[in-house]
Image (tube, rainbow, N blue to C red):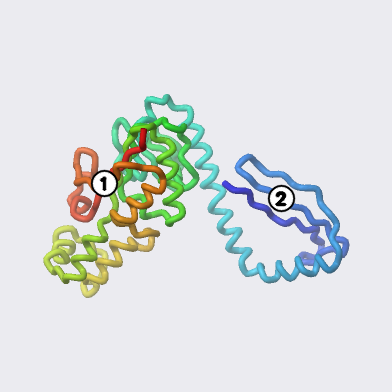
Amino acid sequence: MGMKTMLLLNVDMERPGIIHDNVLIGFLHITSKGMRIDQTVALGQDRLDEIIADLNRMKDEIPALFQQLGAELPMRHQHARTSAIIRSLPATEKRNIQIGSAEHVKPGFLNIDTWPNSGIDYDETTTFANLDVRLGLPLDDASAGFVYSSHMLEHLTFEEAKRHLADIHRVLWPGGRLRMCLPDVDKTAKCYAARDMAYLERMNETFRFLGYMPKENRLYGDLMSRHILEGCTHKYFWDAENLEAALAACGFQNIQEAPYDTSIDQAVALRIETSFCIEAIKAY
């Protein structure tokens, strides 16, 4: 978490919105280590007028900022609690990591996913850790030998994904392996361009991929929208080419596509049909 700074004004509480002529300004600094308030300083009227003008321009943004703060604070508290638990686990329980497990927890893995408002921090039975990886992995450098992720990376923005991939590289030991499965939009796009009606029919009839849509909207455009956007929960489109470039930029080597492997990947027919997999190694 970077440092955030809030401006403090000496406001007349009897008449909300009225700022004293001899205003005192302070700065509240919020960091991952806590908060501190700098000593207040007096401002002249010219500078005060500038600040008031800035605040007036910001007034429409303030409700959204408080709404965002209300959502972020519980998430950060959750992350801190779960992180403390993970750090206390024996190193042997953190050598294999699954990120984005949902309900598909794997024995012998630390299974990580975010589950807001579940009341769960860590479940010992399933080794499930409720953790938002955008805030970082609470794992030591070079402490894991294998990281697995299935249909998770696309739910991050590009910037979040790059930070996350670098974090995975950090926690893998030299020679450690990363395996990722993602939606194979490239395949769907090629079928879309070729108007491969057999593929569209298979998605509709065999997998009911668009079963939630009205019958008249189970067409190729609808299929592309579902595969790329997933109800607007997907935030970035990855294929083997741009994912390989992102992994290489983080220091991974021996990056290559890999066949779907039901001994590790989900043995779900739809996932087999609509996924591509890629593996990479952290250099020795």
Question: Does residue 126 appear in the picture of this structure?
Answer: no
- The image shows residue 153 at horizontal and vertical percentages of 37, 51
In the foreground, 106 or 214 = 106
- The image shows residue 6 at horizontal and vertical percentages of 69, 55
Q: Give residue 93's quadrant in the image.
A: top left
Location of the C terminus by quadrant is: top left
Q: Residues within 10 Å of mark 2 (few under 14, many from 20)?
A: some
Q: Which residue is mark 1?
A: 256
Amino acid type of the residue tagged 1 in the rendering? Gln
Q: Is residue 234 shown left or right of residue 134? A: left
Residue depicted at x 83% and y 57%: 24
In this rendering, the answer to whether 86 lies above or below 241 is above
Q: Mark 2 or mark 1, which is nearer the start of the sequence?
A: 2
Q: Tell me the SS state at disc 1.
A: strand
Residue positioned most to the left: 198
Amino acid type of the residue tagged 2 in the rendering? Leu
Q: Tell me the SS state at disc 2.
A: strand
Q: In this figure, what is the number of numbered marks?
A: 2
Residue positioned most to the bottom: 216
Residue depicted at x 36% and y 42%: 252
Q: Which residue is mark 2?
A: 28
In the foreground, 125 or 228 = 228
